[in-house]
Image (tube, grey):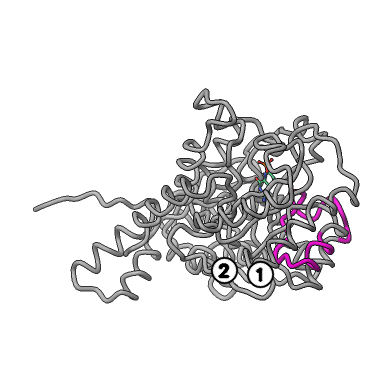
Amino acid sequence: MKVTALAAHTPEAVRAALAARGWEAQPAWFAATGIQTLVVLIEEITEDEREALVHWGAKAGTDVLTGDGWALVAAAASRLAPLARHDRAPAALARLAPALGRVLAARAEPPRSWAIRGAELSLGHPGGVIIGIINVTPDSFSDGGHLATVEAAIEHGALLTAHGARLLDVGGESTRPGAPPVPVQEEIARVVPVVAGLARKGVGPISVDTRKAEVARAALDAGAAVVNDVSGFGFDPALAGVVAEAQAGAILMHMRGTPATMDSLADYRHVAAEVAAELGAVAERAEGGGIARERIVLDPGFGFAKTAAHNFRLLDELATIVALGYPVAVGLSRKRFLGAATGRPVEDRDRATAVACALAWERGARLFRVHDVALTREALTLASATTNPM
Ligand code: PMM
C-alpha cells in the first residue's frame, strides 16, 4: 500500500491525479471541483436557521461551527450544492439558497474575460491582464512628477505596452492619504491630452483613473475604454451613468471615506469578509445603475482605509473577494505595506510588488495594476505556468 497526500489548495492536483489514471479531462475537472472543500461563513442568521444548519451538518457528516447569529460550514462543494437549491434544501434554510448558489457558481465557472468598450480582454492569458500605471500628477506617492510632459507620458505608455501591459491606466488625481482634491478642469487638462495621444498612436486600450463623471466623459470621448474609480462609484453619483452609456469597462475599488478621511476609517473585525460585503454591494449598485455584469472588475483597494496588517490579511484572504464572482484586480504596486515588510523605500519596492502579484495570482486575482510591467510580467508568467496546465 502507498499513501500520498495531494495538494488540495486548488482542484488542480486532484484533476491531474485523475487524468494520470485515465479519466477524461472534463469529468476529472468536475470531480476535482466537486470534492474540493469549501468553508463558508454564514452571518445574520436566526436561531432556527442556526439549528437547521447544525442538524443538516450532523446528517451530512460535515463540520459546522456556530455562535450567536453565525455559522461556519466546511464541506465539499458537491455536498453544499443541495443547500443552494430551493427544491432540495431544508425549508428552514430557504434564505441561504441564492447567496450560496452565487458562491458555488463563481467557484465552478470563474469569469474568463472582461468586456471593455469595443473589446474583450481574456483573463486566461498567461499572466492575466497587467495594467500599466501612467500617473500624470505632480504628487502621486510613488512616482509623482516623474512624467512631466504629455510626450513623456505617451512614450512611457508605449514602453509599458512593449513590456506586456494589456491596459494603460492614466490618472490625474493623486489618491494618497490626505492628498488635496484636484479641480475637474485641472484633472481633464492633465489626463485628456495623454489619453488622446495614446489613442492616436494606437497604444492601449486605455483606462482613466478618476472618481469624476466629467473627467470620465472627456477621457472616454478622447478614446478611453475603461473607467477605474477608486471610490467604487461612491464619490460622484453621475459616474455610473457615464460608464453605462459609453459601454465602458469599470474597475470598482473598495475604500471607505475619501483620501482625506480614509486612514481614520481603517477599522475592521474581519477585513476580508467586510471588504467582500461592501464590494459586493458596490457591484450590485453598479449593475442596478445599468452596467452589465461582464463589464465589471472589482478591486479590494490595498492601502485605502486599511492598515498594513489589514492589507496582508486581505492579500492572504483574497479568494474571499474572488468568490464574489467578478474578475478581481489588485493595486499592490510600491505600496506602503510592502515597505513595512521589506524595509524598502518606495523607489525600491518593485521586486516586492512582483512577488505580491504572484501571491495574488495564486489566490485568484487576474488583473494587476503596476508601475514596473516587465518585472511583474516575469513573476506572473511563472505563477500562471505553475497553476495552469500548460
Ligand atoms: N491605487 C492607487 C490609484 N489607483 N486604482 C485601483 N483600481 N487600485 C488601486 O489599488 C489604486 C488605484 C494609488 O497608487 P498610485 O498613486 O501609485 O497610482
In the rendered image, residue 361, in percent from the top left (x then y), is placed at: 47, 51
Task: Ligand 1: give its quadrant.
Answer: top right
Q: Mark 2 points at which residue?
A: 121
* Depicted 303 relative to depicted 250: above or below: above
* Depicted 31 relative to depicted 147: above or below: below
- Asked if the stretch drawn in magenta spans residue 192, the answer is no
Would you say residue 15 is visible in this rendering? yes
Would you say residue 92 is visible in this rendering? no
> Could you give the CA–CA distance between mark 2 and mark 1, rounded to whole angstroms?
7 Å
CB of mark 1 near ligand 1 (< 8 Å): no
Q: Front-most of 379 and 81?
A: 379
Give the structural element (helix, strand or loop) at label 2. strand
Contact flag, marks 2 and 1 (Cβ < 8 Å)? yes
In the rendered image, residue 304, in percent from the top left (x then y), is placed at: 70, 39
Q: What residue type is labelled 2?
A: Leu
Query: Would you say 249 lies left or right of 82 here?
Result: right
Number of on-image labels:
2
Q: Which amino acid does label 1 sit on?
A: Ile
Q: Front-most of 329 and 157?
A: 157
Q: Which residue is drawn at 53% across and 26% down?
A: 344
Query: Would you say 312 lies left or right of 12 here?
Result: right
Q: Residue at x 74, y 67 (%)?
A: 223
Q: Mark 1 points at which residue?
A: 116
Query: Which residues fall within the magenta stretch?
Result: 216-238
Give the structural element (helix, strand or loop) at label 1. strand
Q: Which callout, 2 or 1, points at the residue further toward the start of the chain?
A: 1
In the rendered image, residue 256, in percent from the top left (x then y), is placed at: 77, 41
